[in-house]
Amino acid sequence: MVISDINEFSCLKPTKKTQCTPVDNVIFLKTHKTGSTTIANVMYRYSKSNRLKVALPGCDHRFCFPYKFTENFLYNHKVNDTYNMLFHHAVFHKQNMIKILDKGNTKIVTILREPYSQFDSAAQYFNFKINYKLSGKLPVLDDLFKMSDEDLTAYIKSQKVDGYGAYSLTKNPNAFDMGFDPWNETSEYIKTVLKTIEEDFNLVMITEYMAESLVLLKNELCWDFKDIVFFHHNARLTKEINTNYVQNIKQRVLNWNKLDVAIYNYFNKTFWEKIKYSDNSFISDVEKLKKFNHLLQQECTTVLNNATVTPNANLLLSDFKIAQKFEDFCSDLLIEEILFTNVLKKAKDENL
């Protein structure tokens, strides 16, 4: 990387805000296998740099999933304690979440992924083959969908799956995370779900368009570019073959997750409508973010491997007015969820 590459980002320096005020009260509903850990890292870094109060889960790194959120799930919570941000896995309950935040402007955001790729990823990550006692003679999706939908429904409901809450992630997992009934797929219920999400959420991001999503997030929350730089977290290093494509597995999966498909299709459309009506700088902002992330990844890899801060690295920080050592900035970008959760819990314990 040459210095001229970095200097073009000087136009991204934070500017004086005259039309909006940064939003500090944020609920990020973390959905499963959607790239949500990448967004959670963005939230963690914003909370750290702005010294905000984070609602922390009392059950490992999740708010006692698969149960709907209640303040009883909070870590070391005292009566009348309030927070600025909530961004760990939880089953959505708007009233209970809003109640524990500071008074003021609160934004609620989430992220969705194309339902087939999400289900395919979940089947591997959550080991459906073992958890659902499948034969192992077929790839996991072929094995799961060799049954009719009626038989599969009865089978899944009869299973007791430890760790992630019964069948919550094998039937419309996004709807479940959002607090809805994953088994109700009537047209009237789907309409109600879509209307409720539209009313409750200020922004629904799309996994397949992470950079576009983060620029929309920046605009929605009136944050700066330095707040939305990102590394992808929890991406699959290896992808198992989950189907032999003997039958139309993709269509079976989509039919099985009819509610999630409706949610994704509707909010994928609203996502692009938001982009359509964004200001003229949106497209260039996305391209600059992508390029900056690429340059940043190169520099962070160099610095963390060699423990040597290059002049280019310092220029990156300078252009974005990031008041942090480059090694620390890279470490925060790369920190995993369980680790930063423990860091936040330790800080909370020390301040009691």
Image (spheres, rainbow, N blue to C red):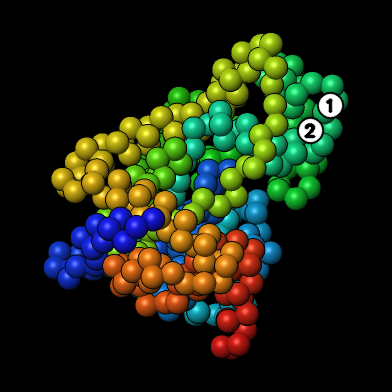
**Looking at the image, residue 259 lies above or below residue 91:** above
x and y, in percent, of residue 201 in the image: 37, 50
Q: Tell me the kind of residue under disc 2.
A: Lys
Relative placement, left or right, of 84 versus 138 is left
Q: Residue furthest front?
A: 2
Q: Residue at x 60, y 87 (%)?
A: 350
Q: Nearer the viewer, residue 286 or 169?
A: 286
x and y, in percent, of residue 268 in the image: 37, 34
**Looking at the image, residue 36 lies above or below residue 347:** above
Q: Residue at x 66, y 59 (%)?
A: 64
Relative placement, left or right, of 343 versus 135 is left
Q: Residues within 10 Å of mark 2 (few under 14, many from 20)?
A: some
Q: Nearer the viewer, residue 283 or 153?
A: 283
x and y, in percent, of residue 346 in the image: 63, 80
Q: Are marks 2 and 1 in contact (CB under 8 Å)?
A: yes
Q: Residue at x 49, y 32 (%)?
A: 114
Say which residue label 1 marks.
136
Q: Residues within 10 Å of mark 1 (few under 14, many from 20)?
A: few
Q: Which mark is residue 129?
A: 2
- SS at mark 1 in the image: loop
Relative placement, left or right, of 131 versus 264 is right
- SS at mark 2 in the image: helix
**Looking at the image, residue 334 lies above or below residue 216:** below
x and y, in percent, of residue 146 in the image: 74, 16
Determine the image quadrant of residue 150.
top right
Q: Tell me the kind of residue under disc 1.
A: Gly
Q: Nearer the viewer, residue 249 or 10?
A: 10
